[in-house]
Structures are given as C-alpha cells and as structure tokens.
Image (cartoon, rainbow, N blue to C red):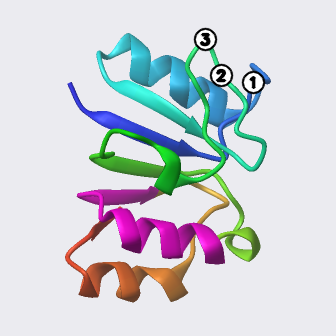
Amino acid sequence: MSTVAVIGASAKPARYSNRAMRMLQAHGHVPVPVSRTGEDVLGVKGYASLRDVPERADTVTMYLSPERQAPVIEDVLAVRPRRVIFNPGAENPDAYSRLAQQGIQVV
C-alpha cells in the first residue's frame, strides 16, 4: 500500500483531484489531500503543505496549474518522493529536469 499525496485536493466531488482520491482509495492506496487550505477530503486529514504530511509520500500527483506550483516544487524536492505525476492542466516542463536531476521520476 503506497502513500500518494494529492496536491490541489478538493472536497468538491466533480473535481478531478477528488475523483483521484476516490480511485486511489478504491485501489488500496493511501491518498493524502494537500491543498492551500489544508482541508480534509473524503474523511482523510488534509495538510496545507507537503512538508506537513507525517508519512513519506511514495508518489505525488499534481492538480495545480504551473503558475501556482513554485512553492510546491520546492516542497517536493525537500521530501523527495519516488515520483511525481503531472496531470492534464498541471504540466510543468520547467520543473521536470529539476526533479529528474534529484532522482525523482516524472510522469
């Protein structure tokens, strides 16, 4: 069972980040919502920063626009997950090489 940090997680059921949380749970993963507000999502404790998540995330899945990612990328580099998945609308080619240089797989 892997821990997956969902960056930009939303409590709104129609949002893709919320759908991702549900799918991750259904497939036996442990999704952790991370958002600016730190709100809980689907009964799972939320965090305002990736650095605040107590367990190490194996994967980070990104649902933030590239314009809002700069501080999050710094957090990713600090916690060093195995991989980062950039979902549609969150693509950030400027961050890919920085992450890859630190041994973080970019998807």
Q: Quadrant of the N terminus?
A: top left
At x 26%, y 70%, the residue is: 104
Count of residue discs: 3
At x 78%, y 42%, the residue is: 37
Q: Is residue 32 above or below residue 57?
A: above
Label located before the other in sequence (1 or 2) = 1
Q: Could you tell me the amino acid type at mark 2?
A: Val
Residue 8 lies, in percent from the top left, at: 67, 46
Is label 2 in contact with label 3 (beta carbons under 8 Å)? Answer: yes
Relative to 73, is 100 on the left or the right?
A: left
Instruction: Please name the residue that numbered disc 1 is placed on.
Output: 11
Q: Is residue 106 above or below residue 28?
A: below
Instruction: Please name the residue that numbered disc 3 is placed on.
Output: 43
Is label 1 in contact with label 2 (beta carbons under 8 Å)? Answer: yes
For label 3, the crowd category at 10 Å Cα-Cα, with few meaning under 14, some 14 to 19 and many 20 or more, is few
Q: Which residues are magenta?
A: 70-85
Relative to 6, is 38 on the left or the right?
A: right
Label located before the other in sequence (3 or 1) = 1
At x 61%, y 32%, the residue is: 46
For label 1, the crowd category at 10 Å Cα-Cα, with few meaning under 14, some 14 to 19 and many 20 or more, is some
Residue 63 lies, in percent from the top left, at: 63, 51
Instruction: Please name the residue that numbered disc 2 is placed on.
Output: 41
For label 2, the crowd category at 10 Å Cα-Cα, with few meaning under 14, some 14 to 19 and many 20 or more, is many
